[in-house]
Amino acid sequence: MLLAGKIPYASTFAVFAAGRAYDQIRNSICYPNLNVKICSTHAGITVGEDGATHQMLEDISMMRTLPNMTVMSVSDDTQTKWAVEEISKIKGPVYLRLSRMETPIIYSETQKFEIGKAVQIGEGTEASIIATGDVVCEAIKAKEELEKQGIKVRVIDMHTIKPIDKEMIVKCAKETKKIITLEDHSIIGGLGSAVCEVLSEEYPCKVTRMGINDTFGKSGKAEELLKYFKLTSEDIIEKVLE
């Protein structure tokens, strides 16, 4: 399709898109730097009852190590519509990570996004919660609850993980007392690791990583699994208050 002048979009469960097709992505797409868009669905533990075999928790790590690959993980319906269209305008391979769980609408249709530029929500200085994907809404809930307690934090929606917004990460480290990363993904190699890589080189500081701690997922309802793996707004609040 690409050689015929089209822009191919390939879509399937993330466990297949990134896992089973890794060799093809590496050697047939990224190595020749082809303009192919991989839109994976059902990523993370929020796949729910399908369980560990279908809960892809390693795809961000795998995809961001590939040369030429752009990696994105979107947080709501508005951002998803924007990303699906916008990735057609950049040349080269893209991995767009989508979830299964229904999430609240965060952004209006007039919201401006840019690939590689995170979205800051709030100006709080007590902590920066840098989140990606379907748990951004949990970070926003935590922010709103903390404000009722007089604690002001900011949420950073890191919808692009590669190239990551280094400027935003360093800005938050300088302006806030605590950095917390949040992802529906393994803490090894994912958003938390990417943020730590930036800060270790640019502005060393402590980072608290919230995600899946070097384990496989489990079968259960999405909301139950978020509680089990401690990725809810209540768990975020606890980390901020520690």
Image (tube, rainbow, N blue to C red):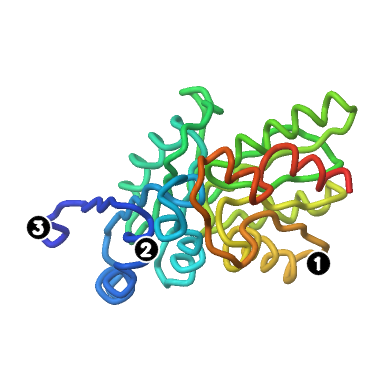
User: Which residue: 57% across, 38% down?
Assistant: 223
CA separation in Å, label 3 and label 2? 25 Å
Disc 2 is placed on an element classified as helix
Q: Earlier in the sequence, mark 3 or mark 1?
A: 3
Q: Amino acid at mark 2?
A: Ala
Residue 212 as seen in the image, left or right of residue 205: left
Q: Amino acid at mark 1?
A: Pro
Depth check, front residue: 203 or 80: 80
Residue drawn at (43%, 59%) of the image: 70
Question: Sequence order check: which comes first, mark 3 or mark 2?
Answer: 3
Q: Find disc 3 in the rendering and name its residue.
A: 4
Q: Are marks 3 and 1 in contact (CB under 8 Å)?
A: no
- In the picture, residue 86 is in which quadrant? top left
Q: Quadrant of the N terminus?
A: bottom left
> Is residue 162 placed above or below 223 in the rendered structure?
below
Q: Residues within 10 Å of mark 1 (few under 14, many from 20)?
A: few
Q: Secondary structure at mark 3?
A: loop
The type of residue carrying mark 3 is Ala
Q: Nearer the viewer, residue 175 or 103?
A: 103
Q: CA distance from mark 3 to mark 1?
A: 48 Å
Q: Quadrant of residue 224?
A: top right
The residue singled out by tag 1 in the image is: 204
Cα distance, mark 2 to mark 1? Answer: 32 Å
Coordinates of residue 212 in the picture (x, y in percent): 61, 58
Asked whether the residues under the numbered discs 3 and 2 touch, taking CB atoms below 8 Å apart as contact, a structural biologist would say no
What residue sits right under mark 2 in the picture?
18
Q: Nearer the viewer, mark 2 or mark 1?
A: 2
